[in-house]
Amino acid sequence: METAPPKDPKPYLRGLLDAAITASLPAKCLPPCLPPPGPGRNIVIGAGKAAAAMAAALEAAWDGADYEGIVVTRYGHKVPTRRIRVLEAAHPVPDANSEAAARAMLAAVRGLGPRDQVVALISGGASSLLALPAPGLTLEDKIFVNKALLASGAPISAMNRIRKALSAVKGGKLAAACAPARLVTLAISDVPGDDPAIIGSGPTWVEGADYRLIATPRLALEAMARQAGLPTENLGDALEGEAAELGRAHAALARSIKGPRLLLSGGETTVSLGQTTPGQGGRNTEYLLSLTLALEGAPGIYALAADSDGIDGMGDAAGAVTGPDTLARASSRGLDAAAHLARHDSYGFFAALEDLVITGPTLTNVNDIRALLIL
């Protein structure tokens, strides 16, 4: 049901982001997809930014069951669990704890039989958090390649193909280690197209696997649309490409549309650093800064872009918001928006305007979320 356009657009946009995150939380979306405990041993494994929250949701649903397990998540994303051990490691570049977690997970599934069951909890970030080098390689080799990939601007699908080739657990190798036990994977997708071979570099994905997507970017955007109260258009949940280029394209689109209207999109853009010594920022704030410049203060257009995991790039912000007065406020504070964009310092720009969106770790991860509000 449609309502009147919001009188305060920025809190309205933040409310839409909250709706997307809430719909994607493990406590909400995991229990309906969880299999019952099996007749033999029940082992829980997992990796990703949402792995600890997924483990906690499983424990609540399997209350009274006999199981054990181990998962790994990003530093700062740990939550209390009763029986499942939670490890922490580095993201987006692996560290020694990433390798230790992979070895611990392989040990947890060693020696299982056909009556046993393994439940794998996979979410975005697993590629870095579960890092065991393939024979002949070292962790230092993987760290070098990871850093180069992150700076290259390559799409996530290309990065994960390379990561799988260098890994002893990715690309279905962890699934092979679970045999002959029954393996069920519950996954939260953070990749364009929701390809299970790409999510976390597919450690438990093989053809014919019991692989259940419990939350996706599309689900998050649908939750936003239900709350919007305005005519809404979904531009797609799998948009890729350079963040700055997408910002300019969306600015042109917004200028061409008569409001009130809400444009939603998801996916994963990239930022190619080239030879520039970068400032601080992520793909969502870079998208917003480019969009802001292209809009040139056009009246009645507001936007929010954020990473659903609560961390855009390497900082403490999920993203930011922008509106018709952003450039004027920046100018009054001596901020050069174009210069900030050129040195990839979008965080610094929006931080100076107090327009960053800070959520903290959300304990889910359905990729980037963008909302363009045209009044």
Image (spheres, helix red, strand yellow):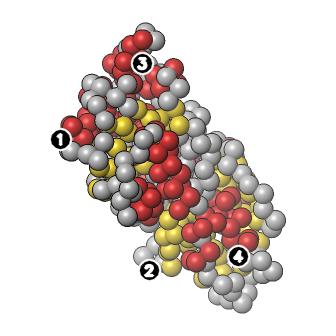
Res. 140 mark:
none
Q: Residue at left 37%, top 25%?
A: 325
| Amino acid type assigned to the residue bearing label 4 in the image | Ala
* Horizontal arrangement in the rendering, residue 244 relative to residue 63 (left or right): left
Give the residue drawn at x 56%, y 58%: 22
Please tell me whether mark 4 or mark 2 is closer to you in this view.
4
Which label's residue is closer to the chain start, 4 or 2? Answer: 4
Q: Give the residue number, with chain letter if any, for mark 2.
A: 208
Residues packed near mark 1 inside 10 Å, few (<14), some (14 to 19) or many (20 plus): few
Quarter of the picture holding the N terminus: bottom left
Circle 1 sits on which residue? 256
* Sequence-first disc among 2 and 1: 2
Residue that badge 4 annotates: 61
Tell me whether the residue at label 2 lies in contact with that at label 1, contact meaning CB atoms closer than 8 angstroms.
no
Whether residue 198 is visible here, answered yes or no, is: no
* First in residue order: circle 1 vs circle 4: 4
Please state which amino acid type lies under the numbered disc 3.
Arg
Q: For marks 1 and 3, give the CA distance.
A: 25 Å
Image spot of residue 170 (x, y percent): 52, 60
Q: Are marks 1 and 3 in contact (CB under 8 Å)?
A: no
**Of 207 and 257, which appears nearest the observer?**
257
Image position of 119 (left or right of 80): left
In terms of depth relative to the viewer, which is nearer, 103 or 307?
Answer: 307
The residue where tag 3 is placed is: 329
Marks 3/2: CA–CA distance: 55 Å
- Residue 101 in which image quadrant: bottom right
Q: Earlier in the sequence, mark 3 or mark 2?
A: 2
Which of pointers 4 and 3 indicates the residue nearer the eye?
A: 3
C-alpha span from label 4 to label 3: 49 Å
Q: CA distance from mark 4 to mark 2?
A: 26 Å
Gap between marks 1 and 4, in whole Å?
A: 48 Å
Q: Position of residue 202 (x, y in %)?
A: 48, 63
